[in-house]
């Protein structure tokens, strides 16, 4: 950084530290106002969580991308999370936002890396795609479909998909997979894992993953929680057999199997409603 850049960044970091953390009730109230179209509420929610962006961005230093740029991209992810947050799911905003922040930062890192490893003409195509995608997002106030991107670029859908193949690691995780433009449409993020998640085991990821697991389990009965925790070693890392769990809980092996199947079914239903978190859980399962 130049001296002036460092001074500006330091000043901004100090201002961020001045924002107090929100209570769960305050988050819900802001989320309701955002849902009603209140942009001031969105700004309040974003400002109160800027320190989360910083805590994530600093962990990606050393990749030849300035910290200021990483923070700026993380802020974009945070703003996106604020607009998409559904307080009805019962999750804390920070738990939800971290995924979007990481995606934005990883996009920047990959954009930098690909400019080195790919031919210039390919990079030019991808940059044009990214610019068009960003413009359409702003114009439509939603993610454009592949057909809309193709029309804007005067390309066929197949040509757009070829660009996406090069761009696979950095395209938006909520790009609709089909031409369904509704908010509930299946997205790319529903089907693939976050490439960063499986390679990171830092404290933030551990805390967030544990928090997510606990919130998912809280939807189950106490007995169902016991079965899953023992079956998959969620408390102590030691997985137990159906017979061992049955003996410990004084029920039959078959009853434990039934409880396990039912509990997993319940979690699966909730999991499917939370498509944005699928990458986190897929990566966690793979790493395990």
Image: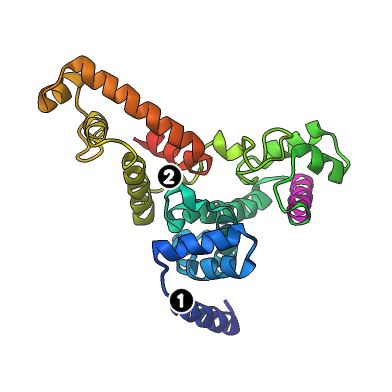
Relative vertical location of residue 272 with respect to residue 25 in this rendering, above or below = above
In the rendered view, tell whether residue 274 sits above or below residue 12: above
User: Does residue 74 show up magenta in the picture?
Assistant: no
Q: Is 279 situated left or right of 169 in this image?
A: left
Residue 225 visible to an observer of this rendering:
yes
Judging from the image, what secondary structure is the residue with disc 2 in?
Answer: helix
What segment carries the magenta color?
120-137
Q: Could you say which disc has been placed on residue 19 in the image?
A: 1
- The residue sitting at the right extreme is 154
- Relative vertical location of residue 110 with respect to residue 255 in this rendering, above or below: below
Is residue 64 at all visible to an observer of this figure? no
**Residue 210, how many percent across, how many down?**
32, 47
Name the spot of residue 247 as percent of width and height, x first.
11, 22
**Residue, disc 2:** 199
Helix, strand or loop under label 1: loop
Q: Position of residue 215 (x, y in %)?
A: 35, 46
Which residue is depicted at the point 65% across and 45% down?
A: 171
> Which-is-in-front pick, marks 1 and 2?
1
Foreground residue among 201 and 22 = 22
Side of 168 relative to 98 (left or right): right
Earlier-in-chain disc, 1 versus 2: 1
């Amino acid at each position: 950084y130049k001296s002036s850049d460092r001074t500006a960044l330091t000043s901004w970091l100090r201002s961020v530290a001045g924002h107090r953390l929100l209570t769960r009730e305050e988050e819900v109230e802001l989320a309701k106002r955002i849902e009603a179209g209140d942009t001031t509420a969105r700004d309040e929610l974003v400002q109160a969580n800027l320190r989360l962006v910083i805590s994530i961005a600093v962990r990606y230093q050393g990749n030849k991308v300035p910290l200021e740029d990483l923070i700026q991209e993380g802020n974009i992810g945070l703003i996106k999370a604020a607009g998409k947050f559904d307080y009805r799911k019962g999750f804390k905003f920070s738990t939800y936002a971290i995924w979007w922040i990481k995606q934005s930062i990883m996009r920047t890192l990959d954009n930098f890396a690909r400019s080195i490893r790919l031919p210039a003409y390919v990079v030019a195509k991808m940059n044009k795609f990214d610019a068009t995608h960003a413009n359409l997002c702003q114009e439509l106030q939603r993610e454009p479909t592949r057909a809309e991107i193709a029309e804007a670029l005067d390309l066929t859908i197949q040509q757009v998909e070829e660009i996406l193949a090069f761009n696979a690691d950095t395209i938006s995780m909520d790009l609709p997979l089909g031409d369904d433009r509704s908010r509930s449409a299946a997205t790319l993020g529903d089907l693939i894992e976050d490439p960063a998640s499986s390679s990171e085991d830092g404290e933030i990821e551990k805390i967030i993953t544990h928090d997510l697991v606990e919130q998912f389990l809280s939807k189950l009965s106490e007995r169902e929680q016991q079965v899953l925790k023992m079956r998959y070693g969620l408390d102590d890392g030691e997985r137990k057999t159906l017979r061992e769990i049955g003996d410990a809980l004084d029920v039959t092996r078959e009853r434990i199997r039934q409880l396990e199947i039912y509990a997993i079914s319940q979690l699966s239903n909730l999991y499917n409603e939370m498509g944005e978190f699928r990458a986190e859980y897929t990566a966690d399962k793979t790493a395990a």
